[in-house]
Image (cartoon, rainbow, N blue to C red):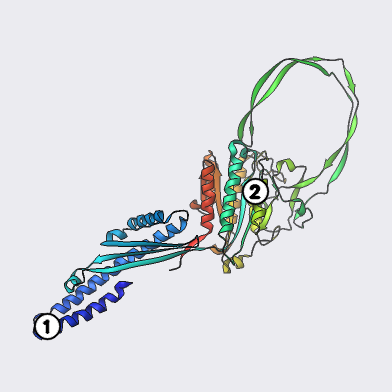
């Protein structure tokens, strides 16, 4: 900085100015010592102010790096606000200029220049010293593997929640892929979940899956007598209430008086029950229902449960088009919520071992700057739990489901020796009023700053945007 060359120049100038008169030098013998001491004091003070200015410019530039949509004027104002907040302006006697140079969304450079008043140096004609600070912040887009684990239960149907989720997820995908640097890897997976998860028909014969064979079962029923209804009259419409996926709803139905015809015989018959697997899977028994280990303990398939399964999983892919297409295909169809299923399969899509082995290994994560992250979004509480000794999620113990959710979160966060090897967990609650599930999701996140509570679609979009920003690291390069 400019203050580094100030002290030697001042000493030289002082010697020149005092060489003209030996008598004056003798008379002012003490003055050089005083001047040199004073210059040293001024120099130290200016150095301290410069260090304070540099720290303030560092903080301001990091903030500016995240504000990519701001105009130059807005950025200039933001930087000056940070300088004031960091008391840099208080220590400067004048802030002459703040210059901002941007290279698209790749980097932001801030140069701040100012002056510090001198004390004893002013006797030599140097009333101020120049100080300056310069910082460049660049986007460091490391290698990423991100699993989107998104609630597709029926409760996402009302009030445009599914549309808001799709829009928010699209923006996150766009931001990550559009900012991806050359020479870096970005892969994403998608895990829609409800009461169960759909692993896709292509995994029917996988060594880690236990899928029963499709079969047809002949059935028969006996004949019976009945009286057919010949007329409905005095019909009225009534309103009923129910609960679906934890959400109260109302419905209407008709109540009528009826006339019946004569007693009639209905002959028996036969039919064929078709037992089919359509991609739906349940859970392994404890403790393997909370661990991504031992694929030889196969994951059980469930027959004729397609109505309770959302769209199939999309495993890690570097195709932006593929992920966005499957986000568009999501529908709110599952009648109940079981968060552990989504979490486990999100974890599995990032794994380097079966059932999916698309993720990089932990040594590669550590040595090649890989970040793995799960983004879990839910709009409500667990409404089902795993049935004891069964692959089904038909139990009603919400307490058990919440405990298992917390256990899986702990296991994911502990999976790795060092921090560089561990998966980050971001959690988002959307229009949730239950404090228990909010606390559960906050505890599940890597830390409290990785948890987002969205009250509406705009807040949900903001949460996904902030998660994307968090995954793109800003660093000071100068």
Q: Quadrant of residue 196?
A: top right
Q: Position of residue 314 (x, y in %)?
A: 68, 53
Q: Position of residue 139 (x, y in %)?
A: 50, 62
Q: In the image, what residue occupies the spot 59% across and 46% down?
A: 167
Quadrant of the rendering where the C terminus is positioned = bottom left
Q: Position of residue 209 (x, y in %)?
A: 75, 54
In whole angstroms, how far apart are the C-alphas of marks 1 and 2? 85 Å
Query: Is residue 291 visible to us here?
Result: no
With respect to residue 125, does 356 lie above or below? Answer: above
Q: How many marks?
A: 2
Q: Is residue 111 left or right of residue 185?
A: left
Q: Residues within 10 Å of mark 2 (few under 14, many from 20)?
A: many
Q: Nearer the viewer, residue 471 or 392?
A: 471
Label annotation for residue 25: 1
Q: Nearer the viewer, residue 193 or 102?
A: 102
With respect to residue 250, does 73 lie above or below? Answer: below
Q: In the image, what residue occupies the spot 43% across and 54% down?
A: 71
Residue bearing mark 2 = 327
Q: Nearer the viewer, residue 68 or 455?
A: 68
Q: Is residue 25 left or right of residue 430?
A: left
Q: Quadrant of residue 24?
A: bottom left
Q: Is residue 191 left or right of residue 450?
A: right
Quadrant of the rendering where the N terminus is positioned = bottom left
> Mark 2 falls on what kind of element?
helix
With respect to residue 105, does 378 lie above or below? Answer: above
> Mark 1 falls on what kind of element?
helix
Q: Position of residue 33 (x, y in %)?
A: 17, 78
Query: Is residue 78 visible to us here?
Result: yes
């Amino acid at each position: 900085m400019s203050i580094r060359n100030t002290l030697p120049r001042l000493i030289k100038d002082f010697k020149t100015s005092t060489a003209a008169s030996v008598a004056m030098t003798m008379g002012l013998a003490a003055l050089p010592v005083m001047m040199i001491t004073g210059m040293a004091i001024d120099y130290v003070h200016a150095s301290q102010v410069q260090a304070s200015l540099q720290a303030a410019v560092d903080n301001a530039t990091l903030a500016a790096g995240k504000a990519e949509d701001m105009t130059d004027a807005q950025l200039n104002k933001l930087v000056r606000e940070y300088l004031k907040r960091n008391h840099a302006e208080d220590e400067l006697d004048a802030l002459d200029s703040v210059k901002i140079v941007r290279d698209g969304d790749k980097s932001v450079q801030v140069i701040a220049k100012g002056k510090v008043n001198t004390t004893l140096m002013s006797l030599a004609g140097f009333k101020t010293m120049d100080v300056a600070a310069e910082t460049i912040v660049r986007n460091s887009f490391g290698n990423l593997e991100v699993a989107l684990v998104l609630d597709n239960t029926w409760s996402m149907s009302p009030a445009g929640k599914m549309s808001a989720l799709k829009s928010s997820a699209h923006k996150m995908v766009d931001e990550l892929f559009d900012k991806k640097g050359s020479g870096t890897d970005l892969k994403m997976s998608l895990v829609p979940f409800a009461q169960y998860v759909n692993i896709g028909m292509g995994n029917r014969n996988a060594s880690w899956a236990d899928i029963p064979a499709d079969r047809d079962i002949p059935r028969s029923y006996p004949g019976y007598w009945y009286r057919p209804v010949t007329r409905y009259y005095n019909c009225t419409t009534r309103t009923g209430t129910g609960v679906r996926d934890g959400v109260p709803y109302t419905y209407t139905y008709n109540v009528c008086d009826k006339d019946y015809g004569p007693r009639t015989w209905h002959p028996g018959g036969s039919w064929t029950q078709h037992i089919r697997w359509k991609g739906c899977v349940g859970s392994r028994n404890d403790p393997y229902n909370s661990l991504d280990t031992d694929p030889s303990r196969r994951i059980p398939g469930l027959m004729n449960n397609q109505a309770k399964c959302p769209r199939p999983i999309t495993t890690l892919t570097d195709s932006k088009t593929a992920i966005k297409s499957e986000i568009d295909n999501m529908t709110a169809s599952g009648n109940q919520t079981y968060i552990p299923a989504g979490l486990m399969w999100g974890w599995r899509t990032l794994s380097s071992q079966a059932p999916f082995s698309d993720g990089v290994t932990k040594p590669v994560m550590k040595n090649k700057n890989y970040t793995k992250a799960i983004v879990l979004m839910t709009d409500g509480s667990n409404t089902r739990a795993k049935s004891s000794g069964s692959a089904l999620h038909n139990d009603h113990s919400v307490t058990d489901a919440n405990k298992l959710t917390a256990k899986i979160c702990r296991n994911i966060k502990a999976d790795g020796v060092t921090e560089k090897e561990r998966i980050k967990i971001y959690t988002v609650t959307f229009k949730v009023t239950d404090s228990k599930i909010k606390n559960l999701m906050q505890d599940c996140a890597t830390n409290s700053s990785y948890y987002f509570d969205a009250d509406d679609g705009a807040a949900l979009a903001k949460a996904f945007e902030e998660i994307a920003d968090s995954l793109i690291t800003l660093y000071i390069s100068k």
